[in-house]
Amino acid sequence: MNGPAASRVPLLDLGREYESISDELESAVLDVLRSQKYVLGPATARFEEEVARFLGVEHAIGVSSGSDAILLALAALDVGPGDQVVTTPFTFFATVAAIVRLGAEPVFADISASDYLLDPALVAQVVGERTRAILPVQLFGQCVDFDAFDSIARRLRIPVVEDAAQAIGARRGSFDAGAFGDLGCFSFYPTKNLAACGEAGLVTTSDERLAARVRRLRDQGSDRRYEHLEVGWNARLDGVQAAALSVKLRHLEGWTRMRGDLAARYDALLREAGLADTIGCPSTAPGATHVFHQYVIRAPRRDELRAHLTEQGIGTEVYYPTPMHLQPCFASLGYRAGDFPQAELASAEVLALPIFPQLRRDEQERVVAAIAAFYV
Ligand SMILES: Cc1ncc(COP(=O)(O)O)c(C=O)c1O
């Protein structure tokens, strides 16, 4: 075979993961189908126990998506009209949508240039009387500076909800992603490091009262059948997804190591190709484990580079091209271009390269050679 189509490098190839575990996965899913316990059954309870142990939290509550996880976590803290939640403008839409859905107001603080994460010093400047929660996002598979957030949150007694949708297994200092905040939120969307075969999510907490509240809110505000203590949602995790997640959780540490090796190899290949001074490679904070949900470079002439890579059959993506303060649906918040310069610069410069555990070494070499060819 010849030509770019023959040697495409996909941004992500879910088929390769499926091939590597198809027997285990099919058998687990078939067990649920045969049991006909589809919603909040034993498969869900088992996954919740396993993932709580994995993350080192007391409670893990399976929910219908990462978006719902954030909504339920904020609702469990009684976030509502009149409240403000401080978060990052450089995230996926769902982080901010959850705040707005509850009638509260998102207040943004800029990110730091080095890691794209919410800058704690800037958070401290915008926290005020109406701040009901701080919502950092563990973007691309890395954790915010927990010590800095701990001192702000403790000093001001403001709860922290982590959007750890992209960071299962990540760690910084003495905390795992999702185990630092009062509540942690995960997504198991099919592209995530731990991925369902559809939609799924998780809320974590070590606070028994919050755990009970999230359990109730995910199930129509009900602890007992047909008795509704409050108005909740239908946001339950189904058994088929839970069974698939239990199978994949057993592989997660190995897959995370493979992602780490691939990231280190990209670093080395880009350096060897003489690109270290041209593009910015991701960095990992001292004492942190980055799980490389994405390997994101900062690239001059990013859009031209992306077009060149597409032409070469190499998949890339821009996470995220428009920061949240400039989204049309949030115009009424009154933010303007220029308000968060680091988030805006990141939106113009970032490019995610292919990374997934089964990505081959020759594919990585092709990606780096194509980047080098563009800049040379
Ligand atoms: C940072 C972030 N927050 C929230 C979500 C929402 O998760 P979901 O797609 O499972 O609703 C995602 C994933 O898509 C995400 O990347």
Image (tube, rainbow, N blue to C red):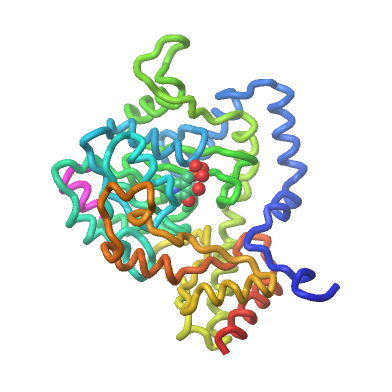
300 relative to 202, above or below: below
Q: Nearer the viewer, residue 136 or 105?
A: 105
Q: Residue at x 79, y 75 (%)?
A: 3
Q: Nearer the viewer, residue 297 or 291?
A: 297
**Outermost residue, top side:** 226
Q: Which residues are magenta?
A: 149-158
What is the x, y in percent for residue 25? 71, 40
Q: Nearer the viewer, residue 58 or 215?
A: 215
Characterize the magenta stretch by its predominant secondary structure: helix
Q: Is residue 327 left or right of residue 352?
A: left
Magenta stretch contains residue 151: yes
Q: Is residue 324 above or below residue 202?
A: below
Q: Quadrant of the N terminus?
A: bottom right
Q: Quadrant of residue 246?
A: top right
Seen at 63% across and 66% down, the residue is: 315
Instruction: Please provide percent x and percent y for residue 281.
Output: 47, 74
